[in-house]
Amino acid sequence: MPAADRSDDSVWRRYRRHGEVTAEKRRHAWTWTTSTGQVMHAHAGDWAVTDDAGVERSVAAGVFEATHTRVAERQYRRRGTVLARRATQQELVATLEGHAVAHEGDWIVQGPRGEQWPVPDDQFRKTYEGPVD
């Protein structure tokens, strides 16, 4: 992407979630590893979410229920909007599950309750539309 276009991406803008995921609410705490190797800690009652690329992650119970609609057994449609900006350098992001690294070019996404998480650029482009503001 040309540098001029990237500068616009580095400010917070609104994006719409889209797509479907497979999910199940877990009764026990568990850990999972991000694509960049950080070990994240999910709590009992959080949702284990798997996207169409087979990548699993956790989503806090209240956050999941506010941002997904059930469409079939274990299938949910993503809904709502988020704020997002592109990381212009490596950043440490405090997520609900622990600290994660956003590398230059990744996106930092902020949910409706202020929770944040990094998303690799290719995944962001598949699961968010916009900006919508």
Image (tube, rainbow, N blue to C red):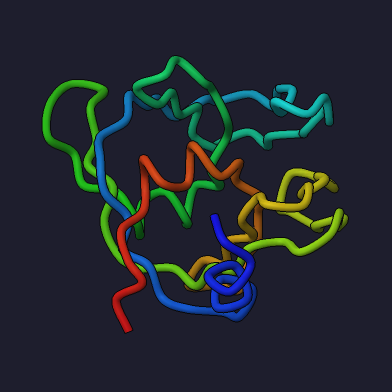
Question: At 77% across and 33% down in the image, what residue appears?
Answer: 40
Relative depth, front residue between 100 and 6? 6
Q: Position of residue 8 (x, y in %)?
A: 55, 78
Q: Note whether 122 is above or below 15 in the view shown.
A: above
Question: At 25% across and 34% down in the image, what residue appears?
Answer: 20
Question: At 53% across and 70% down in the image, what residue appears?
Answer: 5
Question: At 82% across and 46% down in the image, what residue appears?
Answer: 101
Q: Is residue 102 left or right of residue 78?
A: right
Relative depth, front residue between 82 and 47? 82
- Quadrant assignment for the N terminus: bottom right
Q: Position of residue 30 (x, y in %)?
A: 70, 22
- Quadrant assignment for the C terminus: bottom left
Q: Is residue 18 left or right of residue 35?
A: left
As drawn, the residue found furthest toward the top would be 54
Q: Note whether 71 is above or below 51 in the view shown.
A: below
Q: Is residue 20 left or right of residue 42?
A: left
Q: Is residue 31 left or right of residue 82?
A: right
Q: Position of residue 57 (x, y in %)?
A: 57, 30
| Quadrant assignment, res 45 | top right
